[in-house]
Amino acid sequence: MKLLSALLALAIVGAMTPVFAADWTQPESLDIYDPSILDLLDTDLDAIMNTAWEAYGDGDYEKAAQYYLALLYADLGNEITLYNLAGCYGLLDQPELATEFLERSFAAGYTDIGYAREDPDFATVRDTPVFQEMLERMEQQLKESEAECGNVVYFKEPVYLRGRIYLPEDFDPRESYPLVVGLHGFGSQPDRYVRLWKRFEKVDFIYVVPQAPYPFMSDIDAVGYSWGSWIEGEPLPPRSWQLSREYIGDVIETIRGLYKVDDVYLLGFSQGAGMALSAGIALRNQIKGIIAFGGWLEDEWLTADELAHGSNVRVFLAHGNEDMVVEFSHSEEARDKLLELGYDVTLHEFTGGHTVPEEALKVVSEWMAYEPPEDTAEEE
């Protein structure tokens, strides 16, 4: 605990504004009438979390660890923040700290030990005795806990899921507009991703962001969402991705029933980009184009027949060449595979990490506005 307290103190001093003047670890020393206590309430935890994520994506793991430590100060029992810190220390080749924080993450409620065993963040520390011993101990504890709870069972039921929609400022219900369906990344949610419209120079389309269907606890005790289940060894995952594709198709048809819609595009980021490629190709008769930022083409989410017959869909891939979360090569591989199958594919490379920069959205706007010339060649 002494080491943890020291690290927290350093993080608060080096990574947060305002600096907490009060000693929050000594409740009896706090002056409950001191106005500076309100400084804590003014701390923008979302901004700290975003900075941590951006630093991680840029490969600055020391800075990411600083900001994750600052988040941990606000919630010492957050298993996701503890896990992210363990990953940072793994990437910094600090096996003792990676082990300590990962074990505390398990103690706080994190249960996906299968993912932890394969997580590339722990590549340099995975084979150390201290890390291996901890994993084996935690795995045994999780098995014992799971046995006490009984077997897992899933029930398929229709539900209403929340989303956000943004209409153009001069929206006229008598006119037809393009529809852009935004698919947020793993752990995000509609309230965050819908704000992407602010980065476009002009929003002359209907922008709707549906909520991914699978919730889990994200950083700072917020709920994040995933487009599929990642539970290792469960029968749910393959079907969960297919259901998400069907859900996206239902979203498109629902919006068509409410507004006049012409061309439809899927705009995904990270995991949402992978889902955009999968759903867009599968829903080839409902959409015109796919825009995928920092994603990948997951062959397991598509059949060979779907891939072969989806080439009428235009594809725009964008990826930062410094992306440390999803490597740039994933978009290159997707481009090459789709080109081989006859797709119209554009790959836009930009300088940066795992993000959606404004300059790239300008290119996206031009790409959406482009109309390929019709084939006027006469048949022989």
Image (spheres, grey):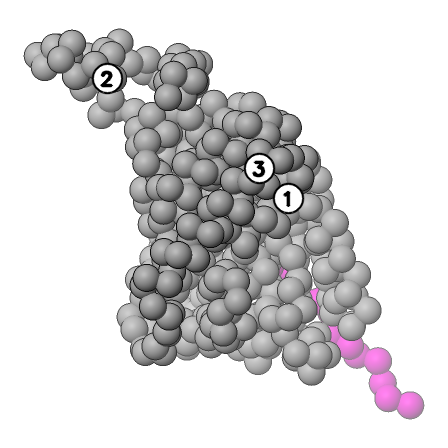
Ranked by sequence position, the earlier of labels 2 and 1 is 2
* Residue 294 screen position, x and y as percent: 61, 49
- Res. 331 in view: yes
SS of the residue under disc 3: helix
Q: Which mark is residue 131?
A: 3
Question: What type is the residue that disc 3 sits on?
Answer: Phe
* Residue 220 screen position, x and y as percent: 34, 38
- Res. 61 in view: no
Residue 45: image quadrant is top left
Furthest-bottom residue in view?
A: 380
Does residue 330 lie above or below 106 as drawn?
below
Furthest-right residue in view?
A: 380
379 drawn magenta: yes
* Residue 17 screen position, x and y as percent: 35, 17
Mark 3 or mark 2, which is nearer to you?
3
Q: CA distance from mark 3 to mark 2?
A: 32 Å
Q: Which mark is residue 24?
A: 2
Question: What type is the residue that disc 1 sits on?
Answer: Pro
The 10 Å Cα crowd at callout 3, few under 14, some 14 to 19, many 20 or more, is many
Q: Residue at x 8, y 12 (%)?
A: 33
Q: Nearer the viewer, residue 326 or 62?
A: 62
The C terminus, quarter of image? bottom right
Q: Nearer the viewer, residue 128 or 301?
A: 128
Q: Which mark is residue 120?
A: 1
SS of the residue under disc 2: loop
Q: Which residues are magenta?
A: 365-380
Q: Residue at x 53, y 23 (%)?
A: 63
